[in-house]
Image (cartoon, helix red, strand yellow):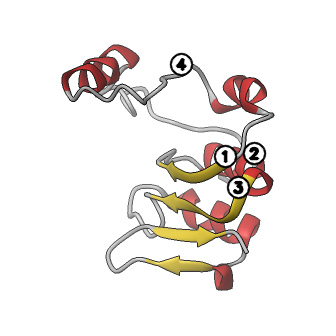
């Protein structure tokens, strides 16, 4: 992504929807889940006063992952964990770049196949 723009193919991310996720949440009786629909940069302002102890980021794209880290990093409680699904993924090339730029490669724990996590000190 040389110029930093958001690129995606027409069929990317077409195998899910907000309604499908709502069905899964309902089917599994996940009563403590709140679904927010929209892009990260649209949703984050409504969460600006919150603190987090755990976040699972499965955003796939460089810009999205970077936005998540920018928002979450200072809002994590001490020893809070951000788990990244797409680190070392063969199809999410921007994940490593975003995570390493924002957190530093030496501060993450890389998982055996793909993924990594960061713990707030």
Q: Gap in Å between the C-alphas at discs 1 and 4?
A: 15 Å
Give the mark toward the camera: 3 or 2: 3
Q: Gap in Å between the C-alphas at discs 1 and 3?
A: 12 Å
Q: Residues within 10 Å of mark 4 (few under 14, many from 20)?
A: few
- 18 or 60: nearer the eye? 18
Residue at which label 2 appears = 71
- Secondary structure at numbered mark 3: strand
Q: Residue at x 64, y 38 (%)?
A: 6
Q: Residue at x 58, y 58 (%)?
A: 94
Q: Gap in Å between the C-alphas at discs 1 and 2?
A: 5 Å
Q: Are marks 3 and 2 in contact (CB under 8 Å)?
A: no
Q: Earlier in the sequence, mark 4 or mark 2?
A: 4
Residue at which label 4 appears = 37
Give the mark toward the camera: 1 or 3: 3
- 113 or 28: nearer the eye? 28
Quarter residue 54 falls in = bottom right
Q: Above or below — where is 71 with respect to 82?
A: above
Q: Earlier in the sequence, mark 1 or mark 3?
A: 1
Q: Quadrant of the C terminus?
A: bottom right
Q: Gap in Å between the C-alphas at discs 3 and 2?
A: 9 Å
Q: Gap in Å between the C-alphas at discs 4 and 2?
A: 17 Å
Taking the view exactly as shown, the residue that stands out farthest to the bottom is 106
Taking the view exactly as shown, the residue that stands out farthest to the top is 19
Quarter residue 44 falls in = top right
Q: Which mark is residue 76?
A: 3
Q: Earlier in the sequence, mark 3 or mark 2?
A: 2
Residue at which label 1 appears = 68
Q: Are marks 4 and 2 in contact (CB under 8 Å)?
A: no
Could you say where residue 115 lies in the image, as x and y percent from the top left?
43, 67
């Amino acid at each position: 992504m040389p110029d930093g723009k958001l690129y995606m193919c027409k069929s990317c991310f077409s195998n899910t929807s907000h309604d499908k996720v709502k069905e899964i949440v309902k089917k599994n009786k996940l009563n403590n889940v709140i679904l927010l629909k929209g892009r990260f940069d649209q949703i984050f302002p409504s969460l600006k006063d919150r603190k987090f102890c755990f976040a699972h980021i499965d955003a796939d794209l460089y810009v999205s992952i970077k936005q998540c880290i920018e928002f979450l990093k200072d809002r994590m409680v001490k020893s809070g964990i951000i788990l990244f699904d797409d680190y070392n993924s063969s199809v999410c090339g921007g994940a490593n770049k975003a995570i390493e730029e924002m957190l530093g490669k030496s501060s993450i724990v890389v998982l055996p196949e793909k993924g990594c996590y960061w713990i707030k000190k």
